[in-house]
Image: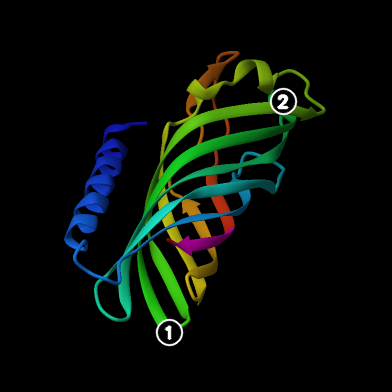
Amino acid sequence: MNKQPFLFSFLFLLMSMFCLSGKAQDSKTTQFGIKAGLNLSNLYTSDASGSDLLVGFNVGIFDKLPVTNMVAIQPEFYLSTKGSSVTYNGLVLDGTARFNLTYLEIPVLCVVNVIPSLNVQFGPYVAYLVDGKVTNVSNISLFNFQQNINVNDYNRFDAGIALGAGIDIGTITIGARYNYGLTKVGKTETYLGKSYTIPNANNGVLNFYVAVTL
Protein backbone atom coordinates (compact mmCIF):
# COMPACT_ATOMS: atom_id res chain seq x y z
CA MET A 1 0.00 0.00 0.00
CA ASN A 2 1.24 3.53 -0.77
CA LYS A 3 1.63 5.19 2.62
CA GLN A 4 2.38 8.66 1.30
CA PRO A 5 -1.23 9.89 0.88
CA PHE A 6 -2.06 8.78 4.42
CA LEU A 7 1.06 10.48 5.77
CA PHE A 8 0.04 13.72 4.06
CA SER A 9 -3.50 13.37 5.43
CA PHE A 10 -2.12 12.74 8.91
CA LEU A 11 0.10 15.85 8.78
CA PHE A 12 -2.67 17.96 7.24
CA LEU A 13 -5.08 17.12 10.04
CA LEU A 14 -2.41 17.84 12.65
CA MET A 15 -1.73 21.25 11.10
CA SER A 16 -5.45 21.96 10.83
CA MET A 17 -5.94 21.15 14.48
CA PHE A 18 -3.26 23.58 15.62
CA CYS A 19 -4.33 26.31 13.19
CA LEU A 20 -7.93 26.07 14.33
CA SER A 21 -6.81 26.15 17.95
CA GLY A 22 -4.83 29.33 17.29
CA LYS A 23 -7.73 31.08 15.56
CA ALA A 24 -10.07 30.27 18.44
CA GLN A 25 -7.82 31.43 21.30
CA ASP A 26 -9.78 34.66 21.75
CA SER A 27 -13.12 32.89 22.00
CA LYS A 28 -14.40 32.42 25.55
CA THR A 29 -16.47 29.45 24.46
CA THR A 30 -13.55 27.34 23.25
CA GLN A 31 -13.65 24.05 25.20
CA PHE A 32 -10.58 21.97 25.91
CA GLY A 33 -10.87 18.72 27.83
CA ILE A 34 -10.13 15.07 28.35
CA LYS A 35 -12.12 12.00 27.36
CA ALA A 36 -12.05 8.27 27.97
CA GLY A 37 -14.29 5.31 27.35
CA LEU A 38 -15.00 1.76 26.23
CA ASN A 39 -14.41 0.30 22.74
CA LEU A 40 -16.28 -2.59 21.14
CA SER A 41 -14.26 -3.39 18.03
CA ASN A 42 -14.50 -5.79 15.12
CA LEU A 43 -12.60 -6.65 11.94
CA TYR A 44 -14.76 -6.83 8.83
CA THR A 45 -13.45 -9.40 6.38
CA SER A 46 -14.85 -11.73 3.70
CA ASP A 47 -11.92 -14.16 4.09
CA ALA A 48 -13.03 -15.55 7.45
CA SER A 49 -15.94 -17.68 8.58
CA GLY A 50 -16.65 -15.46 11.58
CA SER A 51 -15.36 -12.81 13.96
CA ASP A 52 -16.11 -11.78 17.54
CA LEU A 53 -16.10 -8.38 19.21
CA LEU A 54 -13.07 -7.32 21.22
CA VAL A 55 -13.44 -5.09 24.29
CA GLY A 56 -10.92 -2.26 24.63
CA PHE A 57 -10.58 1.41 25.55
CA ASN A 58 -10.03 4.93 24.26
CA VAL A 59 -8.40 7.83 26.14
CA GLY A 60 -7.25 11.27 25.00
CA ILE A 61 -7.91 15.00 24.64
CA PHE A 62 -10.19 17.24 22.57
CA ASP A 63 -10.54 20.91 21.61
CA LYS A 64 -14.02 22.17 20.70
CA LEU A 65 -13.77 25.27 18.50
CA PRO A 66 -17.06 27.15 17.89
CA VAL A 67 -17.96 28.31 14.41
CA THR A 68 -21.52 29.46 15.18
CA ASN A 69 -23.85 29.04 18.16
CA MET A 70 -24.87 25.64 16.81
CA VAL A 71 -21.78 24.37 14.96
CA ALA A 72 -18.24 23.65 16.17
CA ILE A 73 -15.12 21.94 14.83
CA GLN A 74 -13.70 19.38 17.26
CA PRO A 75 -10.21 17.95 16.67
CA GLU A 76 -9.21 15.13 19.02
CA PHE A 77 -6.09 13.16 19.79
CA TYR A 78 -6.36 9.85 21.60
CA LEU A 79 -5.12 6.30 22.07
CA SER A 80 -7.57 3.66 20.88
CA THR A 81 -7.47 -0.15 20.94
CA LYS A 82 -9.06 -2.14 18.13
CA GLY A 83 -9.16 -5.66 16.73
CA SER A 84 -11.20 -8.85 16.92
CA SER A 85 -11.08 -12.61 17.28
CA VAL A 86 -11.26 -13.98 13.73
CA THR A 87 -12.02 -17.58 12.74
CA TYR A 88 -10.60 -18.93 9.47
CA ASN A 89 -11.64 -22.14 7.76
CA GLY A 90 -9.30 -22.60 4.79
CA LEU A 91 -6.65 -25.02 3.61
CA VAL A 92 -3.77 -22.92 4.97
CA LEU A 93 -5.46 -20.37 7.20
CA ASP A 94 -7.38 -22.39 9.76
CA GLY A 95 -8.38 -21.75 13.36
CA THR A 96 -9.16 -18.72 15.51
CA ALA A 97 -6.71 -15.87 16.11
CA ARG A 98 -7.13 -12.74 18.24
CA PHE A 99 -5.79 -9.50 16.72
CA ASN A 100 -4.98 -6.71 19.21
CA LEU A 101 -4.24 -3.34 17.58
CA THR A 102 -3.38 -0.03 19.24
CA TYR A 103 -3.65 3.25 17.34
CA LEU A 104 -2.95 6.92 17.90
CA GLU A 105 -6.01 8.49 16.32
CA ILE A 106 -6.87 12.02 15.16
CA PRO A 107 -10.47 12.73 14.14
CA VAL A 108 -11.55 16.20 13.02
CA LEU A 109 -15.29 16.35 13.59
CA CYS A 110 -18.11 18.72 12.82
CA VAL A 111 -20.28 18.98 15.94
CA VAL A 112 -23.85 20.21 15.48
CA ASN A 113 -26.10 21.02 18.45
CA VAL A 114 -29.53 19.69 17.52
CA ILE A 115 -30.87 21.09 20.79
CA PRO A 116 -28.82 22.78 23.56
CA SER A 117 -28.04 19.50 25.36
CA LEU A 118 -27.80 17.12 22.38
CA ASN A 119 -25.20 17.13 19.60
CA VAL A 120 -24.35 14.98 16.58
CA GLN A 121 -20.76 14.53 15.33
CA PHE A 122 -19.38 13.45 11.98
CA GLY A 123 -16.11 13.69 10.08
CA PRO A 124 -12.90 11.95 8.99
CA TYR A 125 -10.12 10.45 11.05
CA VAL A 126 -6.57 9.28 10.46
CA ALA A 127 -4.69 6.88 12.73
CA TYR A 128 -1.20 5.50 13.19
CA LEU A 129 -0.62 1.95 14.41
CA VAL A 130 1.76 1.93 17.41
CA ASP A 131 1.38 -1.75 18.32
CA GLY A 132 -0.12 -4.86 16.75
CA LYS A 133 -0.16 -8.34 18.24
CA VAL A 134 -1.88 -11.60 17.37
CA THR A 135 -2.58 -14.56 19.66
CA ASN A 136 -3.51 -18.11 18.70
CA VAL A 137 -6.88 -18.92 20.28
CA SER A 138 -8.00 -22.36 19.06
CA ASN A 139 -7.72 -25.03 16.33
CA ILE A 140 -4.54 -23.58 14.80
CA SER A 141 -3.13 -26.05 12.26
CA LEU A 142 -0.77 -25.25 9.38
CA PHE A 143 -0.40 -21.46 9.71
CA ASN A 144 0.76 -20.29 13.15
CA PHE A 145 -0.58 -16.72 13.41
CA GLN A 146 1.38 -15.91 16.55
CA GLN A 147 4.74 -16.91 15.08
CA ASN A 148 4.25 -15.62 11.53
CA ILE A 149 2.67 -12.19 12.10
CA ASN A 150 4.15 -9.18 13.89
CA VAL A 151 3.60 -5.42 13.89
CA ASN A 152 5.47 -5.01 10.58
CA ASP A 153 2.84 -7.11 8.79
CA TYR A 154 0.14 -4.46 9.37
CA ASN A 155 -0.40 -1.22 7.51
CA ARG A 156 0.80 1.55 9.82
CA PHE A 157 -1.77 4.10 8.67
CA ASP A 158 -5.54 3.89 8.79
CA ALA A 159 -8.12 6.43 7.65
CA GLY A 160 -11.87 6.40 7.90
CA ILE A 161 -15.08 8.12 8.92
CA ALA A 162 -16.72 8.71 12.29
CA LEU A 163 -20.35 9.34 13.26
CA GLY A 164 -21.78 9.80 16.73
CA ALA A 165 -23.87 11.74 19.23
CA GLY A 166 -23.40 13.19 22.68
CA ILE A 167 -25.46 14.52 25.60
CA ASP A 168 -24.09 17.56 27.44
CA ILE A 169 -24.61 17.73 31.20
CA GLY A 170 -22.83 20.85 32.39
CA THR A 171 -19.11 20.37 31.73
CA ILE A 172 -19.58 16.63 31.08
CA THR A 173 -20.51 14.98 27.78
CA ILE A 174 -21.66 11.37 27.57
CA GLY A 175 -21.59 9.98 24.06
CA ALA A 176 -21.33 7.13 21.60
CA ARG A 177 -19.56 7.03 18.27
CA TYR A 178 -18.92 4.58 15.44
CA ASN A 179 -15.64 4.62 13.47
CA TYR A 180 -15.23 2.69 10.23
CA GLY A 181 -11.81 2.29 8.60
CA LEU A 182 -11.49 2.61 4.83
CA THR A 183 -8.06 0.94 4.55
CA LYS A 184 -7.04 -2.69 4.99
CA VAL A 185 -5.46 -3.62 8.33
CA GLY A 186 -3.02 -6.24 7.00
CA LYS A 187 -0.34 -6.13 4.33
CA THR A 188 -0.17 -8.68 1.51
CA GLU A 189 2.47 -11.34 2.26
CA THR A 190 3.58 -14.60 0.58
CA TYR A 191 3.32 -17.91 2.45
CA LEU A 192 3.98 -21.31 0.85
CA GLY A 193 4.06 -19.67 -2.59
CA LYS A 194 0.67 -17.99 -2.22
CA SER A 195 -0.21 -14.38 -1.39
CA TYR A 196 -2.29 -13.63 1.69
CA THR A 197 -3.49 -10.45 3.38
CA ILE A 198 -3.77 -11.18 7.11
CA PRO A 199 -6.10 -9.84 8.24
CA ASN A 200 -7.76 -8.82 5.00
CA ALA A 201 -10.09 -6.63 7.00
CA ASN A 202 -11.29 -3.12 7.85
CA ASN A 203 -11.51 -1.73 11.36
CA GLY A 204 -14.92 -1.09 12.86
CA VAL A 205 -15.26 0.36 16.37
CA LEU A 206 -18.25 1.36 18.48
CA ASN A 207 -17.03 3.48 21.37
CA PHE A 208 -18.76 4.89 24.41
CA TYR A 209 -17.07 7.77 26.18
CA VAL A 210 -17.24 10.41 28.88
CA ALA A 211 -15.67 13.80 28.09
CA VAL A 212 -14.91 16.46 30.69
CA THR A 213 -14.28 20.11 29.80
CA LEU A 214 -11.44 21.57 31.86
Q: Choose between 208 and 33: the one closer to the eye.
A: 33
Dot 2 lies on which element?
Answer: loop
Q: Is residue 28 above or below residue 6?
A: below
| Magenta span of residues | 208-213
Q: Alpha-carbon distance for marks 1 and 2?
A: 56 Å
**Residue projecting furthest to the right:** 139
Where is residue 178? Give x, y as percent.
53, 60
**Residue where numbered disc 1 is placed:** 116
Dot 1 lies on which element?
Answer: loop
Q: Main secondary structure of the magenta part?
A: strand
Residue 91 bears which disc, if any?
2
Q: Tell me, what colour scheme is on the image? A: rainbow
Q: Is residue 169 above or below residue 53?
A: below
Q: Amino acid at mark 1?
A: Pro
Where is residue 92? Give x, y as percent.
69, 23
| Residue 209 is one of the magenta-drawn residues | yes
Q: Residue at x 19, y 53 (%)?
A: 19
Q: Residue at x 67, y 21 (%)?
A: 146
Q: Residue at x 49, y 76 (%)?
A: 170
Q: Nearer the viewer, mark 1 or mark 2?
A: 1
Q: Residue at x 56, y 62 (%)?
A: 210
Where is residue 3? Give x, y as percent.
32, 32
